[in-house]
Amino acid sequence: MTWAPTSVLANGVVAAGFLYDPAQDIIYSRLDALQRKAGYAWAFDEAAAPLGMIIDCEPFYFQYAGKLWMIELWKGQYDLETGAEIGVYRDDVGASLPLRARWYACVDAADQLTMKFTLYRNGRELLHRGPESHWWLTGFKWGVFTALTSDLTMELEIVFPKKEMRDAFKQAVREKGYATTEKDSFSIAFTFESPRTEQPLSRWAEGIEQLKNERLVAKYNELKQWLRIPSNDPNAFTGEAALEALISRVPVAYRVVGRMAANILQQRAIDTVRRVQSEADAAIEQAKQTYREVTEFVEKLRKWRMH
């Protein structure tokens, strides 16, 4: 049975670019997630910790087919959830900037890679994803708090369309000291435990943010218990569920009125989510255009100085 959103929270999850997997009780990213239009920049990783995301970042840069590619791994605590990600990007602008100063586009459908990973927490499997053709393979478990990112281990495998592309990525991986295994000429597998890359400076705030995250996870689990919700299914978090918990001893007539009010509020919230998503689309397009104009100017300036 395919999961579909029916609550305000669930529609918000979908609008944010995610879906729910009932089999594993996890949230994962959609192929058509809004984030695909935003691309990637190292500034996103720098901004993660202040936003409550205490995550290990491991980018791999490599050249293939005349383009600079970047595949990045992430694992850690994302506010309310523990999870991991693999993202595939490419520098389509081609600006002569340092690797961390560039903006990378999310690859389109033709350049997606078949990927899979299993995330272990203190040696026990927490979740797994794939194999699946994707540009951003993710998995997140709500209500799980992981104090140390070193307690998380990510075993992953990526399949490339060409041996040459696999070999270019393999070189980038091995240059960082990872041991790899290859079952054929197109795949590569390795384990991500501790990042070899210098982490974002904002990680200095890790202690403070993790205290907040721990409290947030505890409150979330308390809410689930209060509402008698056994899973992380966003559809279960409804106004009706809250009303049932609050007015379980109130006369039936009041309950009917409460449900009607909850349904009206839910529809208004859904309409708001859709409007915000539309406005976000326009903002992202404007940001990308501004970035292209800046990089074009930098490139012209560089050529002018060479003459």
Image (cartoon, grey):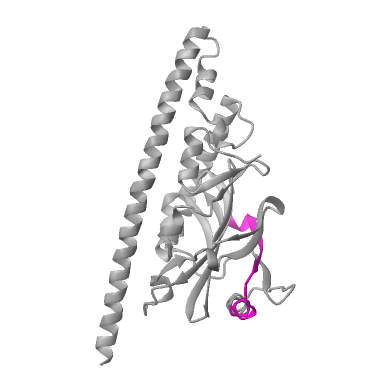
Depth order, front residue of 149/37: 37
Which residue is at the far front? 110
Which residue is at the far bottom? 307
Using residue 78 as the reference point, say whether residue 185 is left or right of it: right
Measuring from the top left, give residue 31's x and y in whole percent: 53, 55
Measuring from the top left, give residue 191's x and y in whole percent: 67, 65
Using residue 263 as the reference point, say whether residue 130 is left or right of it: right
Quadrant holding the N terminus: top right
Position of residue 140 relative to residue 112, above or below, is: above
Quadrant holding the C terminus: bottom left
Residue numbers of the magenta segment: 149-168
Position of residue 220 relative to residue 130, above or below, is: above
Measuring from the top left, give residue 25's x and y in whole percent: 64, 41
Whether residue 193 is visible here, answered yes or no, is no
Residue 164 forms part of the magenta stretch: yes
Q: Residue at x 61, y 26 (%)?
A: 228
Q: Residue at x 60, y 75 (%)?
A: 173
Q: Quadrant of residue 263?
A: top left
Q: Quadrant of residue 123?
A: bottom right
Q: Residue at x 32, y 67 (%)?
A: 291
Residue 73 forms part of the magenta stretch: no
Using residue 256 as the reference point, say whether residue 293 is left or right of it: left
Q: Residue at x 47, y 10 (%)?
A: 254
Depth order, front residue of 195/256: 256
Measuring from the top left, give residue 227's x and y in whole percent: 57, 25
Position of residue 167 relative to residue 21, above or below, is: below
